[in-house]
Amino acid sequence: MQSMSPASHARPEPPVTRKPAKARRDPAPSRWAYRFHRMWLTPLYRSLLRVGLPTFLILTATGWYFSNPTNRYAIAEKVAELRQSVQSRPEFTVKLMSIDGATPVVDAAIRDLVSVDFPVSSFDLDLEAIQASVSGLDVIRDVSVRVRPGGVLEVKVAERKPAIIWRVGGNIELLDRTGHRVASLTERSVRADLPLIAGRGANDAVSEALAILDAAKPILPHLRGLVRMGERRWDVVLAQDQRVMLPERAPVAALEQVLALDEAQELLARDITHIDMRNPQRPTLRLAQPAVEELRRIRSLDRKGTEE
Amino acid sequence: MTELYEQQRAMRAMRKAAMQRGVIAILDIGTSKIGCLVLRFDGQDKVREGDGIGSLAGQSGFRVIGAATTRSRGVRFGEIDAMQETERAIRTAVQAAQKMANLRVDHVIASFSGAGPRSYGVAGEVEVEGSAVTENDIARVMASCDVPDFGEGREVLHAQPVNFALDHRSGLSDPRGQVGKRLAVDMHLLTVDSDTVRNAAYCIKRCDLELAGLASSSYAAGLSSLVEDEQELGAACIDMGGGATGVSIFMKKHMIFADGVRLGGDHVTSDISKGLQVPLAIAERIKTFYGGVVATGMDDREMIEIGGDSGDWEKDRRRVSRSELIGIMRPRVEEILEEVRARLDAAGFDHLPSQQIVLTGGASQIPGLDGLAPRILGQQVRIGRPLRVQGLPQAATGAAFASAVGLSLFAACPQDEWWDFDIPAESYPAKSLRWAVKWFKDNW
C-alpha cells in the first residue's frame, strides 16, 4: 500500500457528505424520570421531602455537632465572650456610686458595705443584693438602688431619725420613733438632747414613752427619764429620785393629773419619793423618811393638844 | 366471555375508586397525537337520582385541571404498532398533564380509534319472574341474549342495552318496577381486536397507571360532538382522525352502530409527500397551512413555497399552486368520505328518521370539507366541534380533541353497560349467599 502523498491526485476528493443529522432529543421522560416525577407529585413524598427531610437533616447535624463536648465548650466560650464584649461596652459601665440622703457616717458605712470595684459593668451589679445589704443597716429606713444613665450607681437612702435613748443592760442605744434601733452610743452625754428610757421592753413602747414625754413638758428640766417596769408600765423618774408610777392604761392622763396637782399644790416640790398613780382613782404618795417623821411629830403634837 | 366480563367489572371498580379519590386521567391514543386530560371531580352530582343527564350535559361535576398533547409515536391506524415508542409518548403526555395539574393521577380511561370495531345487535327475551320487573329480571334478560360468534381474538368493548320491551310496549329506558310478563332487550355489542386492547392495556400498565375504563374513540367523539337532540333523533358522527376514521351512529341517546375506516389525515399527508416529493413533516405543514378540497380560480394563482433542506437549490425552491395541492388532497378525502358512506349504507343509516351527519376530528378541519362532504354523504352535514367543558384550555377545544372531550364525558357519566348490572342469581355458584337469600325469600 503506497502512502498517499499530499501531492498525489490519483484519488478523487471524497464527496462532501452531509453530516448525519444530530439525534433529536427525545422529549419523552425516561422511565425513572417519569416515576420520580409521579412520586414527587404524591403529597406524602412531597411533604416528606420538603419539610421532613430538611428538618431531619438539620436536627441530625445539630445533634451531631452538639454531641461533641469540644464544640459545646467552644460555643459556650464564644457566647460568654460575646456577652462579655457587650457587657463591657462603655454604655454599660458603672463608674461611681452616689449616695443621697445619708449622713457622712452612714455614707461611709454604706460605701464600706457595698464593696464594688468601680468601674464595673451594670450587668455584674446585683442591685437587689445591694439593696438588701444596705437596708440591713439599722440606721436605714428606706433605700432605693438604681443605675442612673451616665454610669452612676445611685443609692437613695432615708435614715432613721433617733428620737430616744434607751439604756439597757450596759449599752446605750439610739431608737427612732417606732422603737427601731438606730445606733449605739458610748456615752449618754453625746446626745444629751434626747430623752432617756430604760428597762427591758422599753423599745416596744417607744411611742407611748414619747407621748408621756410630750405630756411631761412642764417638768422636763427635772425629768431624768422613763423606766419601763415589768415590761408593762412606765415610771417617770425625776430629779432627787422622785418617781411617778404610771398605770398600765392611760398613762398620759395619769401624768397630766399629777402635773395638775403639781400646778395646784406644788406636789413635786414636796418631800415625796413616789407618786403612785397605778390606780388613778386612788393616787398614793410615799413620803421621804424625814417627812414621815415630821408628819408623825406633827400628828403627835396634835394628839397632845387635844388630850390637854 | 366471562373473563372479559370480569375485566370490565374490575375496570368499573377502578373507576369508582378514582371517583372517590376525585381525580382521573383521560388518555386518547390517536395516530397523530396522544392527548391526556386530568379531570377533577368535585362530587357535585353524585347523588343525582333524577332522569336525564343533569345540568350542562352532566359535565358540571368535573373540571379539567391538566391537559397535554404530544405527537404520537408508534401508532398506526389507531393501533399500537411500536410499544416502546407509544409508551414513551404516553409518558410524555401524562407527565405534562400531571405537571399542569400539579397532581398525581393513578387511574386512566383510555380510548383508541383502530382495532377494527364491529357492531352487533343482539336481542334477548325472558319471562318476568314476579309480577313486576326486578333487577334480577334485567340481569336475566341480558344473560339470555344469544351472543353471536364474533370469532377468535375479538373482545367486547361496549355492550349497552339500547332498548327494553315489556310485553307489547317497546322503547322503555328503565323497565324496573313495571308490571309485565315478557321482558325483551336489544343490546348493542361492539367488538374489537383483543390484541390491540391488550397492547393498549399493557402500555398503560407500563406507565404505572391503572386502567379504569376503555372506550372506542368513535363512541367518545359522538358523545362530545353530537348535540343532545342529534343524539336523541338519530345522527352519525364521523371522527376523522389521523390514521383511522371512526363512524358512530346514535339514536335515542344510545350508540347503535360503530365502525371504523382505516383511512385518515395521515394518508392525505403521505399523498402530498409523494406527489410533491417532500418529506412528511413538510407535507404536513403544507397541508395544514394551505390545504383545501375545493379549488377556485384564485387558487391557480396562489403559489406555495415548498421549501426543504435537501441542499439542492432547485429542489428546495420549487413552488406549486394551491390548486395542485387541492388536486392531490381531494381524491383522498373523497375516498375517505366514500368509505364512510359505504359503512353508513351497510349500517342502514338511510332508514333512520334523521339523516344528520357530523364531521369531527382533526381531519375535518380541511377548508372546503363542508362543501365536499354533502355531495357524498347527503345534505345534512355539519362540521362539529366538541362540547366546551370546564377548565379545558383554549388550545384543546378544537375538533381534534373531540374524542378526548367525549371520553371525559364518558368518565363523568358512563352509560350503563352490561357489566354494570347484577349477575343473574342463577349463574352464581350453587351455594352462593344470594341463592340462599332467595331460597329464604321463597320459602318463608
Image: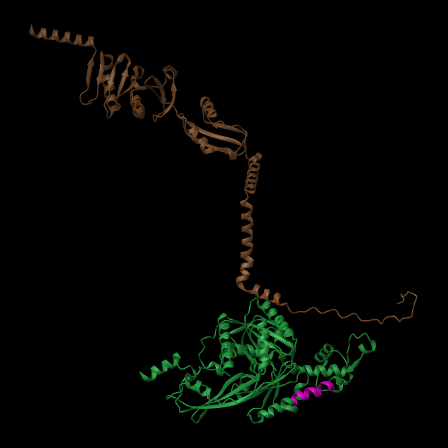
Chain colours: A brown, B green
Please give left or right for residue B217 compared with residue A108 in the image. Answer: right
Outermost residue toward the top in this view: A308
Q: Is residue B411 left or right of residue A161?
A: right
Look at 66% across and 85% down and name the residue there.
Answer: B263
Note whether A222 is above or below B16 in the view shown.
above
Tell me residue B119's x, y (percent). 56, 88
Is B42 left, or right, of B269 in this rendering? left
Whether residue B391 is visible, yes or no, is no
- Tell me if residue B329 is in the magenta stretch: yes
**Residue that extends furthest to the front in the rendered view of this protein:** A1
- Which of the 4 image quarters holds residue B351? bottom right
State the image coordinates of residue A296 (x, y, percent, origin top left): 15, 9
Quadrant (top left/top right/bottom left/bottom right) for the N terminus of chain A: bottom right
Q: Is residue A211 above or below residue B229?
A: above
Work out whether residue B123 or residue A306 is closer to the camera in this orientation and state it.
Answer: B123
Residue A180 percent coordinates (x, y): 35, 26
Is B172 situated left or right of B347 in this image? left
Please tell me in which quadrant of the rendered image residue B281 appears: bottom right
Q: Quadrant of the C terminus of chain A?
A: top left
Look at the image and say whether residue B313 sits in the magenta stretch: no
Task: Residue A140: tell me if it is visible.
Answer: yes
As rendered, which of B22 and A273 lies closer to the eye? B22
B152, B251: nearer the viewer: B152
Q: Which residues fall within the magenta stretch?
A: B326-338
Main SS, magenta residues: helix
